[in-house]
Image (cartoon, rainbow, N blue to C red):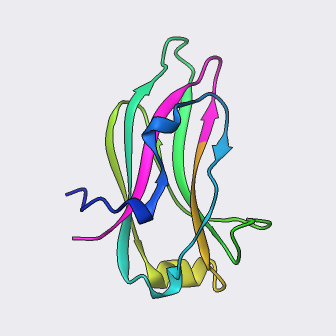
Amino acid sequence: MYGPFDKQLELRDIAAGTVTATTAEAGKAIAVAMAGTFKAVFYVSALDTGSGNETYALSIETDSATAFASPISIGSVPVTTTGVFELPLTQWQVAQLDATAAAIRCKATLGGTTPSITYGCYLAKAD
């Protein structure tokens, strides 16, 4: 469960603060096509549900370069509460969706009246 934390595989530091609009983090150059079986671990410490219509999805995107001119979503998890969420991924899944994947990043997609979420994300070897 969760997997060991490696700072070099961190896609978003939870200390970066709260996100209040759809936001993609900076990309990291990683040989995604050589990654084997891995997972994205999202940990959510706070989210606003006060208006009752807020929606949250945390996703992983890849691209051929860290500039992310043409990002491709390779997986997403809906979030309705705080906690830890895992998104299992494989190099084969990534290759089918993005044959030129050379960079990876996380993205928070928010909707509703007053969305705000505090989260972190890192990659880990799958169990």
Q: Is residue 93 above or below residue 22?
A: below
Q: Residue at x 24, y 62 (%)?
A: 4
- Tell me the magenta residue range: 109-127
Q: Is residue 55 magenta?
A: no
Q: Is residue 87 left or right of residue 59?
A: left
Q: Residue at x 49, y 20 (%)?
A: 48
Percent position (x, y) of residue 53? 57, 20
User: 6 or 75, which is in the foreground?
Assistant: 6
Percent position (x, y) of residue 22? 67, 39
Q: Residue 39, located in which quarter of the rendered image?
A: bottom left
Percent position (x, y) of residue 57? 53, 43
Main SS of residues in magenta: strand
The quadrant of the picture occupied by the C terminus is bottom left
Q: Is residue 123 magenta?
A: yes
Percent position (x, y) of residue 95? 56, 84
In the picture as drawn, the residue positioned furthest to the top comes out as 50
The quadrant of the picture occupied by the N terminus is bottom left
Q: Is residue 8 above or below residue 21?
A: below
Q: Is residue 84 above or below residue 41?
A: above
Q: Is residue 118 above or below residue 4?
A: above
Q: Residue at x 47, y 32 (%)?
A: 118
Q: Residue 61, located in which quarter of the rendered image?
A: bottom right
Q: Residue at x 80, y 66 (%)?
A: 69
Looking at the rendered structure, the number of numbered marks drawn on it comes to 0
